[in-house]
Amino acid sequence: MLNILVKRLLWGIPVLWLVLTLTFFLLRAAPGGPFDQERELTSEMTQLIEQKYNLNLSLTQQYGQYLKATVSGDLGPSFQYVDYSVNELIGLGLPVSLKLGFYALLLALLLGVILGVVAALYANKWPDLVAMITAVIGISTPNFVIAPMLIIWLAVSWQWLPVGGWSGGGWSYLVMPVVTLSLPYIAAIARLVRGSLMEILNQPFIRTARAKGLSQTSILFKHALRPALLPVVSYLGPAAVGLMTGSVVIEQIFGIPGLGRYFVQGALNRDYTLVLGVVLVIGGMMLLFNLLVDLLYRWIDPRIDLELDKKTGASR
Amino acid sequence: MKLKVGLMLLVVIVSVVLLGPLFAKLDPETIHWDDMAVAPDTSYWLGTDVMGRDLYIRTLQGGQISLMVGLLATSVSVLIGVLYGMLSGFFGGRVDVIMMRLVDVFYALPFLFLVILLMVFFGQQLWLLFAAIGCYLWLDMARIVRGQTLMLKEQAFIEASFALGQNNKNILLKHILPNLKSVVIVYATLIIPQVIMIESFLSFLGLGVQEPMTSWGSLVNEGANNMELAPWSLWFPALFLSLTLVGFNLVGDGLRDRWDPSMKQS
């Protein structure tokens, strides 16, 4: 077990290096620079600035220096936010994004599982039909369509909630972003749970439990639900990745100072170090989360062999 | 049932988007100075936006762009995915292990973030949009095609063609590719809505389709910015976009249930 853990963590290093390298050269190949301004700077000023940020070195030298600094944990100074290091900016943005993502995932799991169970228990009756139609609509409606609608109704017309902003993440500021972010995942999880629960309810061991005279509730909670949740666990990896990208839009719409907004602003301003830092953190979190999901999966179903799975490259 | 509803929805939307502009009396780029942010009426069927442009024709033209991007980017990803998966599965062994490891690495990359970067920096060209989205979405297809190819390779008729001395190229093109058809079609149908979603996502961020061209994503973006003044400029593009996605998702699910019962979800 420990062996696998170490191996998977080591496996992350080349992946992160690839992410870093790709992003670095993509950024540098881009037209425009961080200090382009309307007014031409004098050549001395340009020289000073370039010296400060090492821009006077050759590209490979800069790459080497950046790589070295990154390994030691220093992501460099931000180009746009003067006097802020990228580490500080990420320290400010990451907790915000994590909070948003955590609540969204929690809500998606809670509502998704409940909806899915209801749909499976009433398979092909009206609650099922309603749940599944809602799910298709939920999956098919982009979050940037839902967000403005919620703002119009809840914030502008009825004035129940603030239009946007964060202010420390009070619950009234959290409601709309979290709901919007989680909707497609509620729908997807509901569909997964419905499908797998229906399959499991037809299995012989459930029939045995029925024959034994167990009540519907104890069959559901003691026997059927646990195996039915397996596909949901494996879906958590892609879902978390989706939540991270989804939050780029959500943070933009609701004006939330998280990583996603830093990323877009940074890219627009050619803030090389900030963009690299954000991409690195997000890549690292994706790897970490997938690892956690795999471990969780193994814990729930010990028959799964992680090693074997990597070799065949089969998707779960 | 799902398949039928989805197909009907798509037929209606596609014909409205393709044929609707024939009935339009107004130009999409003309600015009607006296009629800014006018609610839907008899002359402006879906109203005008805050710049005074007719939303009926703009929504339909945006739809043409969105659908076109959807189809083209899907073809890019299908092409890459099928080729990659087929070669990996066919050659097997070491080649397969390395190729699939590479897919694992790609899965771990925050790809959409790289696509966003690409669009920020080089974003004025439409072809780049197809290429970027296509390169992002080929991974699932590659895995599925590889699995299918591995299975086909073991079957008697492929062995027979080896025995008859057919070369690899012929076996791949004449015997394996045709047998992949149904799987590829099913999953391609499920890629289209993802592509349209990503295109509109990028356009919403202002990184996709550029003015004066438009797409549902950029229309939703404009609509969202002016929703207090002209809410209809949000409703109609959003409705078209969502209905199209519902249609493709239903057709994809329906096809999958019919042809690939092992992957049945709901």
Image (spheres, coloured by chain):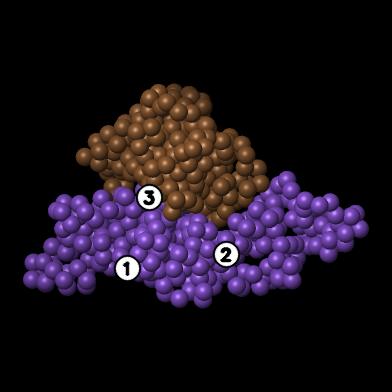
Number of the label disc, if any, that sits on residue A141: 3
Q: Residue at label 1? A: A110
How crowded pointer 1 is (Cα within 10 Å; few <14, some 14-19, many 20+) is rated as some
Residue B9: name its quadrant: top left
Q: Residue at label 2? A: A259
| Circle 3: residue type | Thr
Quadrant of image for the C terminus of chain A: bottom left
Q: Which lettered chain is shown in brown? A: B
| Circle 1: residue type | Leu
Indicate the colour of chain A: purple
The tag earlier along the polypeptide, 2 or 1, is 1
- Left/right placement of residue A270 relative to residue B265 reads right
- Left/right placement of residue A115 relative to residue A263 reads left
* Residue found at the very far front of the displayed protein: B34
- The answer to whether one can see residue B186 in this image is no
Viewer-nearest residue: B194 or B86: B194
- Mark 3 vs mark 2, CA separation in Å: 24 Å
